[in-house]
Structures are given as structure tokens and as C-alpha cells.
Image (cartoon, rainbow, N blue to C red):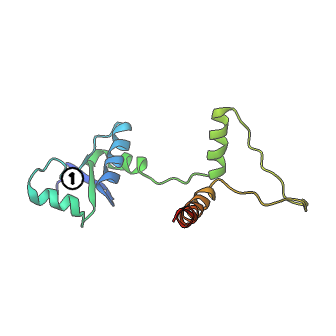
Amino acid sequence: MTTPIETVVKVAATPSQAKIYVAMLQAAGIPARVEGDNLVDEFAAARRLVNLMGTHVMVPTASLEQARDVLQPTTIDPAELERQALAEVGETVTRPSTIGSSTSTPTSTSSEWPWVVLIALPMLAIVAYALLR
């Protein structure tokens, strides 16, 4: 039995995700391509757009194991990621301690202000319309 020249290393959910996988593999020095990317007929284009079967990422069979290692999912510790980001800008991580603090008052977070604006602006518009009418 003969071995194929190329093998599917990963089936991506979208064509964009497949292109990211190809870029990761090429950055590692592994030749990779998206199956059917060079086809120009209407059937191939429609199949890519509809993406019913997923998008296949192809690599040479000889590089299959190395490609699987590159595309292996990894877990990222959010605390370590935050530490690295803050170290990049020269800051240290300091978290406020709320244990034993009975005088702590709740503070507004930056994610709450869009809701305040979305609620307050229409109300102000209604009041302004009522006054000018």
C-alpha cells in the first residue's frame, strides 16, 4: 500500500480558522495549505462558502506528526498571562484585599457605563421632546 503525499492534519470549523492553522504551520516551517483553496469553479466556491464538511488543512504526510504537535491545544493560565502583560509595561499585580474590610463600598466597573448610557440617553431624549413639544 502506498502512502499519500498529503494528509489532513486538522478540520477547521471555518475557512478563516483554517487559514490561521495554515499560518501557524508555515511559521513552524511546515508546508501547509487549505484543501480546495486553489479551485475556481462555482461548485468549489459554493462548497467553501457553505462549509458543510468543514475546511481541511493539508500537510505533507512526512510532516504529519510535527504538524499535530504545532496544532496541539494548550491551556493558558489567566493569572500568568496577566502577570506577563503587566511585566511588559513595568507594573506589578496588586489586588485589593476585601477580607475583614467592613467599610468597602461597591464601585462601578468600566463595563457598566455603556448600560448607563444606553438607558440614560433615551430617557433624556424623551424628556427633551416632552419639554420642547
* Residue displayed at 15% across by 56% down: 45
Q: Amino acid at mark 1?
A: Glu
Q: Is residue 60 above or below residue 132?
A: above
Please name whichever residue, 62 or 57, is drawn nearer the observer in this view of the structure. Answer: 57
Figure quadrant of residue 8 = bottom left
* Residue displayed at 28% across by 40% down: 31
Quadrant housing the N terminus: bottom left
- Badge count: 1
Residue 109 on image: x %, y %: 68, 55
Please name whichever residue, 118 or 48, is drawn nearer the observer in this view of the structure. Answer: 118
Q: Is residue 21 above or below residue 87?
A: below
Q: Is residue 21 above or below residue 119?
A: above
* Residue displayed at 29% across by 54% down: 15
Left-right relation of 124 to 71: right
Q: Which residue is mark 1?
A: 35
Residue 27 on image: x %, y %: 37, 37
Q: Residues within 10 Å of mark 1 (few under 14, many from 20)?
A: some
* Residue displayed at 53% across by 62% down: 132
Residue 94 on image: x %, y %: 77, 45
Left-right relation of 120 to 95: left
Question: Circle 1 sits in a helix, a strand or a loop, which is it?
Answer: loop
Left-right relation of 4 to 21: left
